[in-house]
Image: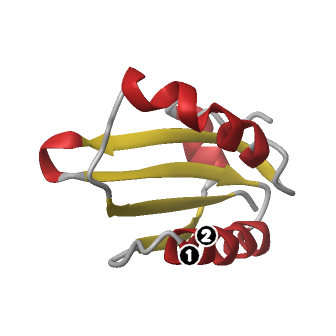
């Protein structure tokens, strides 16, 4: 069953186009994660937060990536990471046009 991973963490910036080019290599690396279908990069400059919403093939893949990413953020000194893994209901998501494809 597909699983959604949500991550939010404190981030001082920069945001938007100002950081897009420098994080492009990381985006390409994330693209190769086992079980990853897609990622939406999220940011809230007014709250100094960044994060992402990911869709994985299953909860085990989502949890494995969360462990890896949390360690990467911790190595960068990021504290206060909030994350959750949620199972996706494919039948209801299809009705509401949820992007479940690979």
The local crowd at label 2, few if under 14, some if 14 to 19, many if 20 or more residues have their Cα within 10 Å, is: few
Which residue appears at 77% of the width and 75% of the height? 60
User: Of helix, strand and loop, which one carries label 2?
Assistant: helix
Which residue appears at 66% of the width and 49% of the height? 90
Q: Is residue 101 above or below residue 92?
A: above
Q: Quadrant of the C terminus?
A: top right
Which residue appears at 26% of the width and 52% of the height? 12
Q: Quadrant of the N terminus?
A: bottom right
User: What kind of colouring is applied to the model shown?
Assistant: secondary structure
Q: Is residue 14 above or below residue 8?
A: above
- Is 24 on the left-hand or right-hand side of 73? right
Q: CA distance from mark 2 to mark 1?
A: 5 Å
Q: Relative to the observer, which residue lies in front, 85 or 81?
A: 81
User: Of helix, strand and loop, which one carries label 1?
Assistant: helix
Q: Relative to the observer, which residue lies in front, 81 or 13?
A: 13
Q: Picture coordinates of residue 74 (x, y %)?
A: 51, 77
Q: Which image quadrant is residue 2 in? A: bottom right
Q: Is there a contact, CB below 8 Å, between mark 2 and mark 1? A: yes
Location of mark 1 (residue)? 75
Q: Picture coordinates of residue 32 (x, y %)?
A: 85, 46
Q: Picture coordinates of residue 23 (x, y %)?
A: 57, 37
Which residue appears at 40% of the width and 42% of the height? 42
Location of mark 2 (residue)? 72
Q: Picture coordinates of residue 22 (x, y %)?
A: 55, 33
């Amino acid at each position: 069953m597909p699983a959604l991973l949500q991550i939010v963490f404190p981030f001082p910036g920069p945001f938007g186009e100002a950081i897009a080019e420098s994080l492009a290599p990381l985006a390409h690396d994330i693209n190769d994660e086992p079980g990853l279908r897609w990622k939406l990069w999220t940011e809230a400059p007014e709250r100094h937060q960044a994060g992402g919403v990911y869709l994985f093939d299953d909860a085990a893949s989502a949890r494995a990536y969360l462990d890896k990413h949390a360690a990467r953020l911790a190595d960068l000194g990021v504290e206060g990471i909030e994350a959750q893994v949620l199972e996706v209901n494919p039948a209801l998501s299809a009705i509401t046009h949820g992007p479940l494809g690979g």
